[in-house]
Image (cartoon, rainbow, N blue to C red):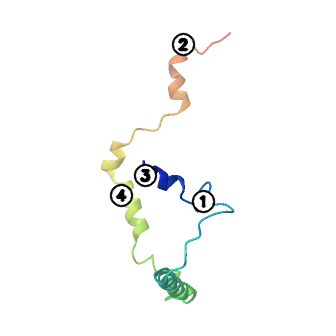
């Protein structure tokens, strides 16, 4: 009973607490400011690395050719064992071949 009386007379914000015209605004703490400062510094370091890349455009244009990943991928799919696992190609003519009874329609 006493808890209900305390909650009944408690002054709160109508509606959602953190939205709207009469919202409850959290006070800014020192810890929140430090966290936000660290986050901004981290983003600035990342942007600095993105603005000044390690390789130039000429250096980065052919760096993947030495890895030969494309050739390895093609070799994996052209392997005889994987080709045998795949179903053969079927055309529409082969599917509808059973409907042919005779060629002369006249």
Circle 2 or circle 3, nearest the eye: 3
> How busy is the neighbourhood of tag 4: few (under 14 within 10 Å), some, or many (20 plus)?
few
Q: Nearer the viewer, mark 4 or mark 3?
A: 3
Neighbour class for label 3 at 10 Å: few (<14), some, many (≥20)?
few
> How far is the residue under mark 2 from the one under mark 3?
92 Å
Q: Earlier in the sequence, mark 4 or mark 3?
A: 3
Q: Residue at x 41, y 66 (%)?
A: 71
Q: Secondary structure beneath disc 2?
A: loop
Q: Are circles 2 and 3 on residues that touch, CB within 8 Å?
A: no
Q: Position of residue 5 (x, y in %)?
A: 48, 52
The mark nearer the N terminus, 2 or 1, is 1
- The residue beneath circle 3 is 2
Q: Position of residue 47 (x, y in %)?
A: 55, 84
State which tag comes first along the sequence, 3 or 1. 3
Q: Which residue is mark 2?
A: 101
Q: Is residue 82 left or right of residue 14?
A: left
Identify the residue at horizontal 51%, vertical 83% (top origin). 33
- Mark 3 or 1: the one toward you: 3
Pointer 4: what residue? 76
Identify the mark at residue 87; answer none if there is no mark.
Answer: none
Q: Are marks 4 and 3 in contact (CB under 8 Å)?
A: no
Q: CA distance from mark 4 to mark 1?
A: 64 Å
The image shows residue 50 at horizontal and vertical percentages of: 54, 84
Name the residue that disc number 1 marks. Answer: 13
Category of crowding for the residue at label 2, using alpha-carbon neighbours closer than 10 angstroms: few (below 14), some (14–19), many (at least 20): few
């Amino acid at each position: 009973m006493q808890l209900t009386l305390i909650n009944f007379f408690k002054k709160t914000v109508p509606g959602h607490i953190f939205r709207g015209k009469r919202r409850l605004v959290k006070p800014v703490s020192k810890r929140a400011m430090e966290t936000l400062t660290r986050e901004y510094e981290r983003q600035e370091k990342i942007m600095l690395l993105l603005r000044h890349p390690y390789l130039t455009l000429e250096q980065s244009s052919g760096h993947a050719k030495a890895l030969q990943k494309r050739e390895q991928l093609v070799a994996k799919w052209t392997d005889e064992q994987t080709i045998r696992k795949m179903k053969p190609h079927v055309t529409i003519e082969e599917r509808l071949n059973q409907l042919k009874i005779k060629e002369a329609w006249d």
